[in-house]
Image (tube, rainbow, N blue to C red):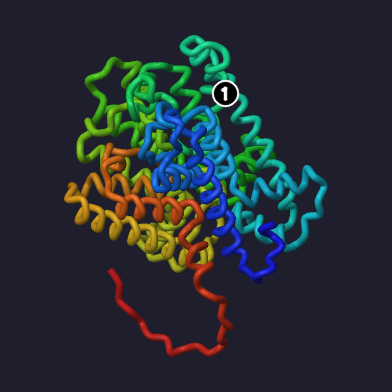
């Protein structure tokens, strides 16, 4: 098992290896003849791209999910999304607990890193909370979606569609089965459907808040003052990032639609970039300003310890508060009556730097290789590294090298940039020696 650690792997290496093994397993299953409608099986590169996208809960695809994959293939994709969304380590811990296996300190430490828990104490209990939250939320989502899909597809297919889209939305995956209404059409046929829009939006938001924030809400209800600082930052930043983009989309992009559809389109396109991958509007019809705003929202993403990707909204909040402190010439960064440690700000700055550099460099490389406009390539690479899944329709047209870049970005975004770096760089002894201090001008 992955936690016996016979090869003395670090915690970060074990997390990465677990995702890699799941991707390869999914690839082999999707290559089986019974995984495709044609009965011939998917090619290795189609299978590994789809498996990577599902495990990394991204949603970028090179084959239409509804029309290319068989029922077995769709089931494999659904399982990959579920395990990838919860996290391989989380699923392992839950299964071990159900089988009454002993969960040692090593496993608890790995679990702490995997879900970004503040402390190792109570980690098993927190894992149970994650599992219960996932099951309850996805079941409720499927129940709310069922009347619509039952009316269109009948009972059995209605159940399957409800479960698939509920899991995909909560896990912020963005995979859909709407290809029978138009290849790669996502949820555009439901742009004016209130029930579908609201259900998918709520599933995306709940999945992207982070299980730590959800635990605070469960424990302290509406008593905001009792929440942990991280939860306060996530909720406050989420509110801002829901209101401001909605205002822009409502007045700047969808002003030629009837009021009801205009509200739904604006709300959905505000929520889905963080980081669900569904869309109810044709994104190619947005203005350049709208595309840039979606790219920004994709890069910010959801919360740490959630099913969403991106730089993370709490990272964005910490950097914003640090900027305000600098503007005010304060020596320390504070928020909600609490100080934010310099080490946290340093980590947030590092995460921001490596994500932006990976995003920009990959965009430039793909644009050069494919001869495509840089904006289109920036959209696809932001979607990949933030594990969103939104597309301007160029992913299916990319060459193998460009697709490999997107696969790396998806994996990078799901396991986390720092996790990859910490796994690659061996831990060294910390020296007590300090070099001379000298000022450096910035800005």
Would you say 358 lies left or right of 436 here? left
Estimate the x, y position of residue 432 in percent, counting from the top left: 57, 87
Name the residue that disc number 1 marks.
142
Judge whether residue 240 can be spotted in this image.
Answer: no
Could you tell me which residue is drawn at 40 percent across and 24 percent down?
A: 178
Q: Quadrant of the C terminus?
A: bottom left
Residue in the picture at 46% in, 50% down: 312
In this rendering, the count of numbered labels is 1
Q: Is residue 299 above or below residue 343?
A: above
Q: Residue at x 24, y 29 (%)?
A: 253
Front-lying residue, 255 or 443: 255
At x 69% / y 39%, what residue is drawn? Answer: 219
- Where residue 245 sits in the image (x, y, percent)? 34, 36
| Residue 359, horizontal then vertical, whole percent | 33, 56
**Relative height, residue 213 to residue 257 (above, below):** below
Q: Quadrant of residue 189?
A: top left
Please determine whether, in this image, residue 346 is positioned above or below residue 368: below
- Residue 141 rendering spot, x and y as whole percentages: 56, 25
* Residue 366 visible in the shown view: yes
Quick check: 241 above or below 162? below
The N terminus: image quadrant:
bottom right
Mark 1 neighbour density, 10 Å: few (under 14) some (14–19) many (20 or more): many
Tell me where residue 376 sits by quadrant: top left
Query: Is 231 situated left or right of 322 in this image?
Result: right
**Element at label 1:** helix
């Amino acid at each position: 098992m992955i936690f016996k650690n016979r090869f003395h792997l670090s915690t970060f290496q074990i997390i990465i290896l677990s995702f890699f093994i799941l991707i390869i397993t999914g690839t082999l299953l999707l290559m089986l003849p019974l995984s495709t409608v044609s009965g011939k099986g998917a090619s290795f590169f189609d299978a590994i791209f789809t498996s990577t996208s599902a495990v990394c809960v991204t949603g970028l695809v090179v084959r239409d999910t509804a029309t290319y994959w068989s029922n077995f293939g769709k089931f494999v994709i659904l399982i990959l999304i579920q395990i990838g969304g919860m996290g391989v380590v989380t699923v392992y811990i839950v299964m071990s607990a159900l089988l009454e296996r002993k969960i040692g300190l090593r496993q608890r430490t790995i679990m702490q890193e995997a879900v970004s828990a503040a402390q190792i104490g109570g980690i098993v209990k927190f894992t149970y909370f994650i599992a219960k939250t996932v099951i309850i939320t996805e079941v409720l989502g499927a129940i709310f979606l069922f009347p619509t899909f039952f009316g269109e597809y009948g009972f059995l297919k209605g159940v399957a569609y409800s479960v698939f889209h509920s899991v995909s939305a909560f896990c912020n995956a963005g995979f859909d089965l709407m290809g029978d209404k138009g290849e790669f059409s996502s949820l555009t046929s439901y742009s004016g459907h209130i029930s579908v829009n609201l259900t998918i939006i709520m599933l995306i938001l709940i999945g992207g808040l982070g299980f730590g924030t959800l635990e605070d809400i469960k424990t302290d209800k509406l008593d905001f003052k009792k929440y942990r600082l991280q939860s306060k930052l996530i909720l406050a930043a989420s509110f801002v990032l829901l209101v401001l983009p909605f205002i822009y989309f409502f007045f700047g992009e969808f002003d030629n639609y009837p009021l009801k559809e205009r509200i739904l389109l604006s709300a959905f396109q505000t929520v889905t970039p963080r980081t669900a991958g569904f869309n109810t509007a044709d994104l190619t019809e947005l203005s350049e300003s709208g595309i840039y705003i979606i790219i920004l929202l994709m890069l910010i993403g959801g919360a740490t310890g959630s099913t969403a990707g991106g730089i993370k909204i709490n990272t964005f909040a910490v950097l914003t508060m640090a900027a305000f402190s600098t503007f005010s010439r304060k020596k320390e960064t504070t928020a909600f009556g609490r100080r934010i440690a310099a080490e946290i700000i340093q980590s947030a700055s590092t995460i921001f730097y490596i994500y932006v550099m990976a995003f920009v460099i990959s965009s430039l490389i793909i644009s050069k290789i494919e001869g495509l406009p840089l904006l289109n390539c920036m959209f696809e690479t932001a979607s990949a590294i933030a594990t969103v899944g939104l597309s301007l329709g160029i992913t299916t047209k990319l060459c193998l090298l460009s697709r490999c870049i997107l696969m790396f970005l998806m994996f990078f975004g799901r396991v986390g940039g720092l996790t990859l770096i910490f796994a690659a760089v061996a831990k060294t002894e910390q020296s007590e020696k300090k070099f001379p201090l000298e000022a450096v001008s910035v800005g």
